[in-house]
Image: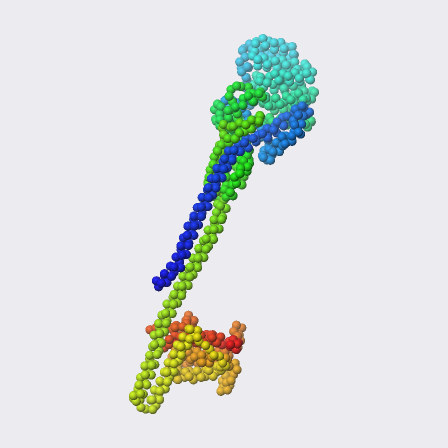
Amino acid sequence: MPVFFWQAGLILLPVLVIAAVAITAILQNRAEVEREAQGRAEEVARQCGKDLERSWGGLLMSQDYYAWQWCAYLASVVGAWPGSEERTQVEADAARSPTLSWQAHVAEWQTQNPGLPPEEVFPDRFLLTAEGRICEGMEFNPAPQPPAWFTGLSSTQRAAWESLEAAASSGADLKEVQQRLARFEETNPGPEAAKNAAFLGLRARLATLPPTNAVGEAQRFSWTCHEALTEAGLPLSNLAFSEALRYARAMGPSEALWKEIREQVLWTPSLLTPGLLAQLGELAGTNATLRAGVDAWRTLWNARLKLHDIAEAIRQSGKLRGITTTNLWIEQGDTRWLCVLNPDITPTVEAARGIRHTNAPLTVVRFLPKSVAERSLVRALANSEVRLPEYLGLAAWLEGESLTLPDRWLPPRGTNSAPLLLAEASGSLSNPVRSSLEVKWEDLPSRPRFVLRLYLADPARLFAAYRRQALLLTGLVAAAAFGALVGVFASWRAFQRQLRLNEMKTNFVSSVSHELRAPIASVRLMAESLERGKVSEAPKQHEYFRFIVQECRRLSSLIENVLDFSRIEQGRKQYDLEPTDLIALAQQTVALMETYAAERGVNLQLQFPDAINHQLPNYQLPEYQVPADGKALQQALVNLIDNALKHSPKGGTVLVGLENQKSQIQNPPSVLLWVEDHGEGIPPSEHERIFERFYRRGSELRRQTQGVGIGLSIVKHIVEAHGGKVLVRSAPGQGSRFTIEFPIKSWNAS
Ligand code: ADP
């Protein structure tokens, strides 16, 4: 037994070692894959971060350039008087260099920002005073207040002003108005008050002039009062221009008016601007070109209006304290805007355009919609050399605001667990931005900060190769383990069989010795008695001799069996086939066994079918003439009859029969030679085992019958060597029938 366990151990041990090694390898490989992914993600994050620092800022901040081009086109071409010098000039420039033309820029804008009208982004910047007020020509004030010149009027000045105003608004004649105007001027009012008074005088005078002159006068007046406010706090210039538009109705639109609208919309915006545009629209009438111009100005006006909302939101955010360097996100309309606030360092440029009206330091606010930030990020990532492995997902924040990226960059959604964060990088947009006013690059002191995070977005993809390998390895180990277990099981079976065989062999040796000892002892006894002359009567002597002969025959039959068995075991048993008559064989064998049967008190009979009985004694029936080794076949029959006699009760009958079986569906025609007894029978579970060598039923001690356990195994061997088979039909208490079946076909063939 220990030997077996040693063997099993030797078979299983290598498999266990292989399995252990494979499991460690699999675990290590997984860790390795994860480490690699982590390393790759860190590398990608670092490289992406660097690339974004270099290019994102530029891409982001230069977006306005195209919008600026577009809006400049709206102002200088669409909004300008048809055939005006400016319009002709811009169109000629565009024709000369198409790649630099506004069309090219607008096309570029549209490919880069589909669905986002350029004027959304125009203007891209404005100036804020330390108090958070827009400083851009005349300030647009959505809630105008009476200005200082008005609230500061002395009582005499106020009385003179009110009398002038009453006359002007009641439509008094020009003379009356001029007198009151002179009276007001005598009170020595400030320049702004004087301008307002002069406007009232002008208005009265215009009514007396021919419309052409009235338009010219009003326009000229509007040029002189860009910074003056009316007593209600509205730009005086707007009112003057409105007068010009009113008188122009009589004579139709003109280039001069179209030139002036630019100043009115861009530099003196007020609550009156929409009214002015409406008046201008009326003047344009059905002229499509002019109407398009008015629409262009309306677009530009709306773009400007947006500044005030944004400025207001900035003020309310509380982040603007004096001159600020900061970045923030604000909500305006349906859009989130990134506002980049920096101290204004370009006073000379702005001043040269006449925008700046103060020497106080200002904050320049650049602002871009979130969608532009997102698109420029995608472009910057696409421009970057870094390729994102497919299993990684990228998420980005700009100034704390999470940016929405296309799916390609996103960690997949819909997974329950949050994706694993592998690496993070941050940086700031330190890029120079191109100022839209001149070709000049400036750095943003308030570098907007960004954060990049790389996630393990698709673990299945990452681990695909690893999983295949692990599966293969597991499969191999499982196969090896299975093989080893089968091996152990097989050797366990073999081992068990060997044990059983050994036991049976031992029993066999003791059975054989026992079988030999008893007859030899009695033969010796009788022979000695005869030798000493103790048995004198002739019949008795005869009986002794007969007994001795019979015992010797039995002994030689036993020895024959043992020798045959040994020949069979060694594969030396040979059969000489010659025509053999089965009827004769059965008759002879029964005759041979009769004495033995009589001795045991058992009735041994032949039972032939009628076909044979009719022919007897001339029993030359061809179907029972078969080629066979007669001696061997007789030995098989002897063994069967011997077993039947041994297991029959005293007085019982043993039948030996022969019959011819016709061909059936499954069986070819055959000859059946059978031996039947009415003994204790054999349970079906043992029907196969009784043919095993050395097998004997029951325990060694309880066994009543003689025998050594090789008889049936010899029968089986002989019959199978003849191409036949041995069948048992038996059940406990119902006797047994052993049938030798020779198929005639193979019989004839052999
Ligand atoms: P043995 O020398 O023991 O007879 P065999 O190989 O001839 O060996 O038979 C094997 C076993 O089969 C016997 O031990 C017996 O138990 C059983 N056996 C054989 N023939 C018969 C039978 N006719 N009736 C009952 N049992 C039988």
643 left or right of 397?
Answer: left
723 left or right of 100?
Answer: left
What colour scheme was applied to this rendering of the protein?
Answer: rainbow
Q: Quadrant of residue 260?
A: top right
Q: Quadrant of residue 300?
A: top right
3 left or right of 304?
Answer: left
Measured as percent of width and height from the top left, residue 472 is found at 47, 53
Measured as percent of width and height from the top left, residue 112 is found at 58, 35
Residue plotted at (59% across, 28% down): 68
Measured as percent of width and height from the top left, residue 271 is found at 58, 23
Q: Quadrant of residue 13?
A: bottom left
Q: Quadrant of the N terminus?
A: bottom left
Residue plotted at (49% across, 79% down): 577
Q: Is residue 387 visible?
A: yes
How many discs mark residues in the rendered view?
0
Of residues 124 and 437, which is closer to you in this image? 437
> Looking at the image, is 730 positioned above or below residue 104?
below
Measured as percent of width and height from the top left, residue 257 is found at 65, 21
Residue plotted at (49% across, 75% down): 723
Q: Is residue 730 visible?
A: no
522 left or right of 27?
Answer: left
